[in-house]
Amino acid sequence: MLSFDTLIIGSGLAGLTLALKLADRQKVAIVTKRSLLDGASAWAQGGIAAVLSPDDSHDEHIRDTLTAGAGLCDPETTRFVVERGAAAVSWLIDQGVPFSKEDNASQDFHLTREGGHSKRRIIHAADATGKAVQQTLADKVRAHPNVTVLEHHIAIDLITGRKIGKSPTRCFGAYVLDTSSDRVDTLSAARTVLATGGAGKVYLYTTNPDTATGDGIAMGWRAGCRVANMEFMQFHPTCLYHPHAKSFLISEAVRGEGGILRLPDGTRFMPWHDERAELAPRDVVARAIDYEMKKGGLDCVYLDITHQSEAFLREHFPTIHERCLSLGIDIARQPIPVVPAMHFTCGGLMTDLAARTDIDDLYAIGETAHTGLHGANRLASNSLLECLVFADAAAQDILSGSSEPPEPLPDWDESRVTDADELVVVSHNWDELRRFMWDYVGIVRTTKRLQRAQHRISLLREEINEYYRNFHVTSDLLELRNLVETADLIVRSALARHESRGLHYSKDFPLTAPHAQPTILRPQD
């Protein structure tokens, strides 16, 4: 058994920020499924939204967030996050993050504007902000003597009092599989923090990395935490469609610079769906593409930015230009094949303003958590801001609490399991889940499709639980188990919402209800 003051499961921006804010006073462990940088935070192309300009204000940022959230943002949480934005960015600057300046001679940071924002307030590092931030923080985490980084480790489940005959509503740590040795480690901690990101891999097409399998949400739910608003899964309209290019996002800024969406025969189609055409909000554009693909039986549509010069594209979209060119797509001369893709999980484990969940000594931060900030649709670049603010809030709460020593815990029991004999079942179930979630629980939903998905999930869960009980755990099995759990939460939440609001669009309930209410699921329900 390994013991720590705080155990952080996940190594995205929220997890790394929390580790650095605790490490001078605590012994901290970070558990991450692959390497320290293999998470969604490092993939963020945009930036961090914060009030950094004298012609901007907290009230304007709050208003933009509430508008995007379609009536479901929590006003107290929104103000809490926005008012701490400048301090959060200042902390990153102090860590040495190389944000873009106005020009080489300027000391002023360049601020850009994205969809839904009324002002320029997005601080960024070219078109690869997440990578710059994560690399800076990861280097500091690796160098800190009080931080133990456990790479290639995947959490199996939280250890709660219910499992070991102690207080049933307290978390004592987690069982973790070392995938390099197939050994299960017992990690005891006075505080445990879930920072595992979202659940994009529950869908066939996603901009998320392979690590985004809903692990923290599923583990928290199994431990007894409430979840909220899991029906609001944000789909980005334009993900690169190519057999060798999983999960590569084509920024909406390409449409902002005049990119045109076309059918395979070259026909422009967005004006048929919305007077704002390609500059309509993400959910509108995603639904339009989904409609045209289903109507025409298309694999993808095309985003045409060829009216811009190659020099312009290299300057404004260096990452996108280089990636497409490596796949044989010259975006200066040919349109980019794109599909909508699941992008962000707006719901998650319910937390308070200190990032505490319903289980004592268990916290959730980042995309794993439902703080109330995003409502029914996330405002662009508010996600990294949320990671920073709630990592700081969690750190303050943890450091102000009593420092109880970690508890001795029983080892993982594998005395009654054997090696799996049919691993193909796991890969087949993974593929089936992602396909029917895309087809039945995607951008446009119906009650009948949701019920079909629910039936399939029930059958898959039965098979997977049998596997989990009888065979040695593997990373693929653990991720599939968590994905099925998360998929069930998404479907149950979607069935409970009898309206269309924000990211949830139902053909059976196309109108928006006069009063917005969150969807809250409780484990005992």
Image: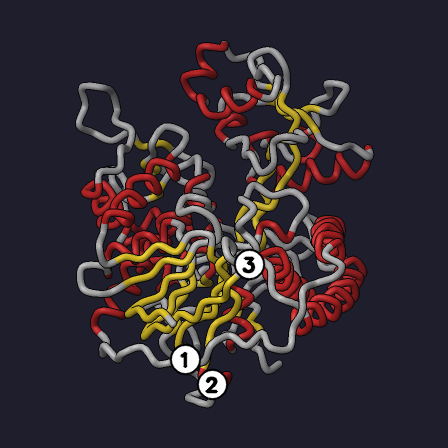
- Dot 3 lies on which element? loop
N-terminal-most mark, 1 or 2: 2
Label 1 and label 2: CA atoms lie apart by: 8 Å
Depth check, mark 3 against mark 1: the one in front is 1
- Crowd tier of the residue under label 3, counting other residues whose Cα lies within 10 Å: few below 14, some 14–19, many 20 or above: many
Task: Look at 61% across and 36% down and name the residue there.
Answer: 246
- Crowd tier of the residue under label 1, counting other residues whose Cα lies within 10 Å: few below 14, some 14–19, many 20 or above: some
- Dot 1 lies on which element? loop
N-terminal-most mark, 3 or 1: 3
Residue that mark 3 sits on: 214
Label 3 and label 1: CA atoms lie apart by: 26 Å
Residue that mark 2 sits on: 164
Name the foreground residue: 473 vs 278.
473
The picture places residue 8, in percent across and down from the top left corner, at 37, 62
The picture places residue 285, in percent across and down from the top left corner, at 62, 37
Name the foreground residue: 197 vs 286.
197
Residue that mark 1 sits on: 409
Task: Look at 28% across and 48% down and name the residue there.
Answer: 142
Q: Which kind of residue does numbered mark 2 sit on?
A: Ile
Q: Which kind of residue does numbered mark 3 sit on?
A: Gly
Label 2 and label 3: CA atoms lie apart by: 25 Å
Q: Which kind of residue does numbered mark 1 sit on?
A: Leu
Res 352 seen here: no
**Direction from residue 407 to residue 307 in the image, left or right:** right
* Residue 22 disc label: none
Q: Are marks 1 and 2 in contact (CB under 8 Å)?
A: yes
**Direction from residue 426 to residue 32 in the image, left or right:** left
**Direction from residue 228 to residue 419 in the image, left or right:** right
Task: Look at 51% across and 70% down and name the residue there.
Answer: 157
